Every structure is written in C-alpha cells, then in structure tokens.
Amino acid sequence: MAQDTFLRPEFLVADEEELRSLFPATHAVAVEKCLDRLDTHARDFLKRSPFLCMGTQAPDGSADVSPRGDPRGFVKVLDDKTLLIPDRPGNNRLDTQSNILANPAVGLLFMIPGFDETLRINGTAKITRDPDLLAMLQVRDRAPRVAIVVFVDEVFLHCAKAFRRSNLWDPAALQDRSEMPSLLNMIMDQTSGAPDDPEEMKKIDADLEDEYRKSMY
C-alpha cells in the first residue's frame, strides 16, 4: 500500500508559513523559557529523574528514539553545559551510538514518576570510554563500557498537557500486562515463530527474566 493512500493532497500542509497560520501565535514565555544552560531547576529535575528518551538521527536521515533508565539521578551534571549519560547493557544494536557518530545532534526528554511536567534538552553528543568518567557511573561496582557526553544547547521545561491527557501516572489507568503476550512471545511471532506449547513459552519467558537479573549492569 502506498504511503500516501490516505492523504488528500489539497489538505497537506506544505510549508512553515501555512503551518503557523493554523495556530495562534506563540506565547512569549514559551520562547523565553528556553535556556542555553542548566539552571537550578533543571539540575533539580535531573537529580530526580530515573528515565529519559534520547532522539538521534541516522546518516540516511531516518529517526530513532531510545529509552534510558537507571536509579534516579543517573545522568550526571558535569557543569552547566555538559551531561554524562551511562550506556548500560542492552541488545547491542547500538542504534543510538552509531547515529551519534554520524550525526551528533540529540534530543533528550526527561521524566519523573508522578510529575506531569518533563524536561527537554537539545544539544550535541560524543561517545567516551574515559575510565575516570565511567567510574562516576558505576552501579553495583560495574561501570558501563562507554558513556554519552551531551553538550547542552537548549534546556526548557515542558507543560503537563500530554501526561494529563494520557493519565500516564494515574493508578486507575494502569492496564493489565497479561492482556498482551510476553515480549519474547511477540518477537518470536514476528520472526521464527513462537512455540505452540504454553509451558515451553513460560520457560522461555522465565529464562529472559533470569537474564534480566544477571545482565542489568
């Protein structure tokens, strides 16, 4: 199916001038709140945040967003313009790292459980294996193999509307995980095919949980 099957050309927004004509003018504070360095409030937010999403771009222009999580305050502030982010064990696709090597521009979105507001940081990144920097990121006496250093260009707090619309932190909005298959079940369905025997699938899922415990750091 063609990508534009559902798009009627006469309703496509073609340029920024047309786009901005569809919306009210930006409030002055929305522009003024954008800082070029980490202030007291940004630092306090980072101390509390256990989770971020990092946006990068591949050499061909395709986009990627990767989640990063650790104990609260896991991102270290080196100075008002520099962050240090650990690269914990994962699936070794290395999408984010490869993208940074090709295009250092990054976008970060920090979240705090229970907070409807977020912190956004845009800048450029480099990958380091400096043992002194990696030592700052140890958890359970294990340092990451590499870390991502982000040089801050823009910092601003983002309003609560998205989180309030989604009820993300509302306990009443939590969904039952059992309503969908396990992660491995879904991936196996998409690739080699999941086993028909439920007990075999339970064993595979249990092995993944054991691997999580062993390889988190």
Image (spheres, rainbow, N blue to C red):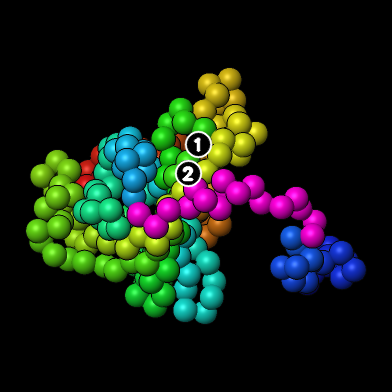
Let me know if residue 12 is in the magenta part.
Answer: no
Q: Nearer the viewer, mark 2 or mark 1?
A: 2
- Checking the image for residue 157, the label placed there is 2
Q: Position of residue 37 (x, y in %)?
A: 35, 54
Residue 62 at least partly seen: yes
Q: Position of residue 43 (x, y in %)?
A: 31, 42
Name, please, the residue furthest toward the top: 172
165 over 55 or under it: above or below: above
State the image coordinates of residue 73 (x, y, percent, origin top left): 28, 40
Left or right: 62 with respect to 102?
A: right
Q: Are marks 2 and 1 in contact (CB under 8 Å)?
A: yes
Circle 2 residues within 10 Å: few <14, some 14–19, many ≥20: some
Q: Left or right: 140 with respect to 169? A: left
- Which residue is nearer to you in this view: 162 or 2? 162
| Residue to which mark 1 is pinned | 117
Q: Which quarter of the figure is the N terminus placed in?
A: bottom right
Please tell me which residue is depicted at 84% across the width and 63% down the height of the picture: 6
Residue 207 point in image, percent of width and height? 33, 42
Dividing the picture into quadrants, the one containing residue 166 is: top right
**Segment colored magenta:** 21-37
Kind of element beneath mark 1: loop
- Residue at (59%, 25%) from the top-left corner? 173
The kind of residue tagged 1 is: Glu
Number of on-image labels = 2
Q: Which mark is residue 163?
A: none
- Circle 1 packing at 10 Å, graded few (<14), some (14-19), many (20+), is some
Q: Residue at x 66, y 51 (%)?
A: 26
Numbered disc 2: secondary structure:
strand
